[in-house]
Amino acid sequence: MATRDTDWDGVRLHVVTGKGGTGKTTVAGALSLALAADGRRVLLMEVEGRQGIAQLFDVPPLPYAERRIAVGPGTSSRPGGDVFALVADPESALIEYLQMFYGLRHAGSALARLGVMDFATTIAPGLRDVLLTGKAAEAVRRKDGARGRSYDAVVMDAPPTGRIGRFLNVSAEVSDLARVGPIRGHADTVQQVIRSPETVVHFVTVLEEMPVQETLDGIAELRALGGIRPGGIIVNMTRPMALPPGQLHEAANGKLDLAQLAIGLKAAGLDDSQGLADALATELAEQARTTLGQEEQQQRLESARQPCYRLPWISGGMDLAGLYRLAAALREQKAA
Amino acid sequence: MTGRSPARLDVDRLIDDRRTRIIVCCGSGGVGKTTIAAAIGLRAAEHGRRVVVLTVDPARRLAQSMGLSSLDNTPRLVPGVQVGDQADGTGTGPAGSLHAMMLDMKRTFDEIVEGHADPDRAAQILANPFYQSLSSSFAGTQEYMAMEKLGQLRRADEWDLIVVDTPPSRSALDFLDAPQRLARFLDGKLLRLLIAPAKVGGRAYLRALNAGFGVVTGMLTKILGTQVLRDVQTFVSALDTMFGGFRERADYTYQLLRAPGTAFLVVAAPEEDALREASYFVERLDTERMPLAGLILNRVQQVPAAQLSAARSLAAAEVLQAAAPGRPRPGHHDGPSHPAPPHRGRGQLGADHQAASRQLTIAALQLHAERMAQAAAERRVAGSFAAAHPLVPVAEVPAQPEDVHDLEGLRRIGESFAAR
Ligand SMILES: Nc1ncnc2c1ncn2[C@@H]1O[C@H](COP(=O)(O)OP(=O)(O)OP(=O)(O)O)[C@@H](O)[C@H]1O
Ligand SMILES: Nc1ncnc2c1ncn2[C@@H]1O[C@H](COP(=O)(O)OP(=O)(O)OP(=O)(O)O)[C@@H](O)[C@H]1O
Ligand SMILES: [Mg+2]
Ligand SMILES: [Mg+2]
């Protein structure tokens, strides 16, 4: 396998979190494509039962089974690797767990029918989490005779930042509930994977106050837990600002040279009689203020001292082509 | 899409109408519920109403600007509100006031427990690990507690207008569904079976459930271990005294939401996902016969130079680019285009000036084209919402260039509620 020098060489479980709506699913998808370059085999996993991956890759709803959904970007010398997807739900994971460890297939389904899963996961959310992270850990560790590891990398489209600490700190969450017993043992195994150097947690954000705050809080929370490694900060939906930095402050303060703009408009053959230059200057001013606000947020992010990546806003709606563009951007920045 | 524009939602009339006692701001995640709720509260107070705003998870700076530095679950008077500045301009109307609070769901839950059980039992419940996980992380607890708090504020009767922000959630419907789900869970059959399978063995379907119960406990024991099951049972029997209480309380608030004097505002950003959620919510309110006041379309792109079309703007930018001597054309999508300042040679000053003016104008024209395209896309999605819900009045709130994090910003948003 060609080795590339990336920021996360050696990482095999990439957990992707972020405030709701910032682009977790999209970025997890792009990251899995990026990781699948050079013939690597990647599993993209969803745990919130929303069929976000199917929507993103424009395929029919996915079952609790690993399905090939895409091929990573290839090069002339090496075709891209396969991206598989899995939609994990706690019920199926429990049934699988019972079958794997106790050979109890029917009992599991019966339980599910009785609504016991609902009950158990309501009263003990840690149980649901350990089943889901357990599935990821299993995929990370799985071996397949011929090729060694079944997957070179697993990418998880994880719960939002507000819940990520609890979600990943399964062992502690479960041990509050179960001091002994089989689920406790299972949780401990899962915890080893999550706290290994092979696992990192990436944060997706946009440059607004709340998502940035959540990112900083989330990183601090993981650090406080100890052993769970924060990964990259992925700033999503960035747009270029056409103004040179020198003029940014001028524009934001409404001090642009209107005469310059008027001359330019004239040269472009536009009529300025309706106060066009004025109106355009207002637009520039607003945009400049937005950009300055974003720069402030960018600086706050840098205080976290984690690698930062920027992904462009894809205009006209997200589609596969856009997703490959994001994957390429991640590779260029050595995030994958 | 029809060409008709929907009826305008008159937010000022809604808040000036003394019969309006509760305004609930709903909507999907991140659309601006908290901001709009605060802006409405502020405007209503400055219009002379005694207002309390119940916020959920406000951005830190916004909370600070409202004097909410600690999460203590009680309403605080917001300083800096311009009271006595009545809408009629006479300054003689009743003086308004604004209180605000942040919801602390765990504390609210604890208070219910403390209010319903004797001290010993309450302490026992509060210490139980299952109670702790339920009260801090059950999906739906936040919604239930927001409703609970609304009920408390209403009963306190110290305010004549309560503005309610709703918890961040993917779906606006969660606000209506989650409390019922928690209540159902808390007085659910399975829970009861867990404490006293024998007690409920009478009816046929319960007998059937009961037969399965041995299997169920067996399995739970297998998965969780015996001690867990014991903890659950202790918790459940401790809560037993409060069963029914939860249902009743949820029902009470639910009725409050239906009562005259309550108005729902659905907040949405002019994006497909948010408007789809808004659609679901509007339809749901209709089936529940809950009073919808209208849709607040938040963060609508304003384009000051709307007289210039996107196409003409781009064409003009291209003319200027073509005129630039020997410079590669900055592609539209290739990131920031900051051509290096031209080399200063003899007699180049005039040319420099021209280049700078060209560059500035190109930037302005490209930005303008983008904003026009964005505004057109927003109008398109808003148009399909209006076509599907022609009877829902709509108020637009302009996108502000910066985050809204102080009273001044809230006031500016409030101004867009003024009748035009
Ligand atoms: N770089 C981008 N450019 C343009 N649109 C984007 C970009 N990234 C994400 N989006 C769009 O933003 C919306 C939210 O993205 P996505 O569903 O990935 O977020 P999420 O964090 O997974 O949301 P949720 O919290 O609901 O799971 C989608 O419509 C998606 O297409
Ligand atoms: N009209 C507006 N113009 C510009 N920014 C806005 C506007 N309305 C809200 N915002 C900003 O959008 C962000 C999200 O707003 P807000 O927190 O009110 O949303 P919310 O619906 O309450 O989100 P959540 O679902 O997370 O509770 C904030 O940073 C806020 O400042
Ligand atoms: Mg998602
Ligand atoms: Mg909010």
Image (cartoon, rainbow, N blue to C red):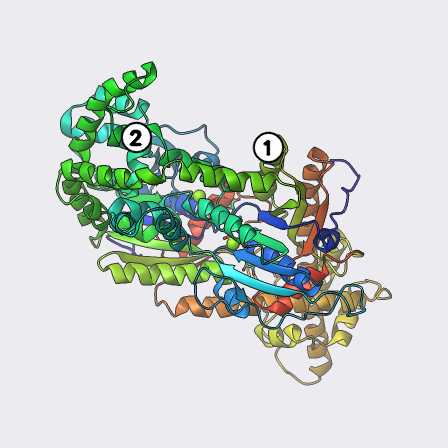
Callout 1 secondary element: helix
Q: Chain of mark 1?
A: B
Q: Of marks 1 and 2, which one's residue comes earlier in the chain? A: 2
Labels 1 and 2 positioned on one and the same chain: yes
Location of residue A258 (image quadrant)? bottom right
Relative to residue A45, is residue B304 depicted above or below?
A: below
Residue at the top extreme, as displayed: B204
What kind of residue is marked 1? Glu
* Residue located beneath label 1 in the image: B288
Mark 1 vs ligand 2: CB below 8 Å: no
Image disc number at residue B192: 2
What kind of residue is marked 2? Arg
Q: Position of residue A175 (x, y in %)?
A: 19, 47
* Residue at 41%, 45% in the rendered image: B141
Q: Nearer the viewer, residue A54 or A324?
A: A54
Disc 1 and disc 2: Cα gap in Å?
Answer: 29 Å
* Residue at 71%, 60% in the rendered image: B317
